[in-house]
Image (cartoon, rainbow, N blue to C red):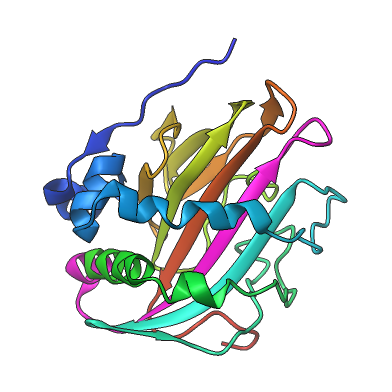
Amino acid sequence: MNVLLDPPLVGADDVVPTLADDGHAVLAPQGLAALVDVELAALDALRPDWNDLPLDAYLRDGGRYRRRRHANFVVRGAELTHVPHRAHWQPVEYNALHGGLERWFEPMRAEVIALPVWQRLLLALSAVCSAVKGEQPWYVEAHQFRIDTTDGIGRPTPEGAHRDGVDFVAVLLIDRVDVKGGETRVFDADGPTGLRFTMHRPWTTLLLDDARVIHESTPIQPLAAGGHRDTLVLTFRSGGFQEPGA
């Protein structure tokens, strides 16, 4: 049985107070489009790029289920800067499986980064972060993920329930095709309170205050050949990118 639990959705006008009060908020696709001030069709122009992601060569569990690309940006108010490609790094305190390792993923395609809708998306979500924690530069890492089921199971978060060591995390569902599982779970970092739901409509967006909550997504299994789950994960950090010694 493939049971889908609908997320607790809020509108674009309520995302900032909900994120500030609860430490998390979920936007419906139409809510994200309203926040970015574009039509959903404009966002959909980004989706084909998930069909050509290279394998993640750093999975320490030996899996072949994850494909990804990576890019880095700095947002200062209404100014978005794509910075030179750099390694993704997390301390072991936040990622026990892959922490302490400089991971050089293939960069996002220049033609995707150049799309006006991509720039509007990052600026809009950065504005939410500033509305919650004050206007400041945001150091943004973008991760395109495809989790597939070629080997029977795919793990969106092989590190388990975790925080990312940043200020905010945005998880955007790009597509979900012929899979079961992939339940999203969000828990208070300092207590047992939590919620669980399934992101199953493209452009459903989960926003997290990384200091206040931990999160994970459960493994996926195929309902048909080629089953996969695509997401865009954006992290927003004040003060600089995570790097060794920082």
Residue drawn at x 50%, y 55% is: 232
The image shows residue 234 at horizontal and vertical percentages of: 45, 63
Question: Is-magenta flag for residue 235?
Answer: no
> Which residue, as the protein is rendered here, is positioned at the far top?
1
- 226 horizontally vs 57: left or right: left
The quarter of the picture where the N terminus appears is: top right
- 167 horizontally vs 156: left or right: left
The image shows residue 198 at horizontal and vertical percentages of: 46, 30
130 vs 55, nearest the viewer: 55
Residue drawn at x 32%, y 55% is: 42
Can you see residue 104? yes
> Which residue, as the protein is rendered here, is positioned at the far left?
13
Residue drawn at x 72%, y 73% is: 103
Q: Quadrant of residue 152?
A: top right
Classify 43 as above or below 73.
above
Q: Quadrant of residue 140?
A: bottom left
158 vs 72, nearest the viewer: 72
- 56 horizontally vs 22: left or right: right
119 vs 183, nearest the viewer: 119
91 vs 221, nearest the viewer: 221
Question: Is-magenta flag for residue 140?
Answer: yes
Residue drawn at x 70%, y 67% is: 99
Q: Quadrant of residue 107?
A: bottom right
Classify 242 as above or below 173.
below
The image shows residue 72 at horizontal and vertical percentages of: 51, 78
Classify 170 as above or below 185.
below
The image shows residue 236 at horizontal and vertical percentages of: 40, 70
The quarter of the picture where the C terminus appears is: bottom right
Question: How many numbered circles does the render carry?
Answer: 0
Q: Look at the image and give the residue range highlighted in magenta.
A: 129-155
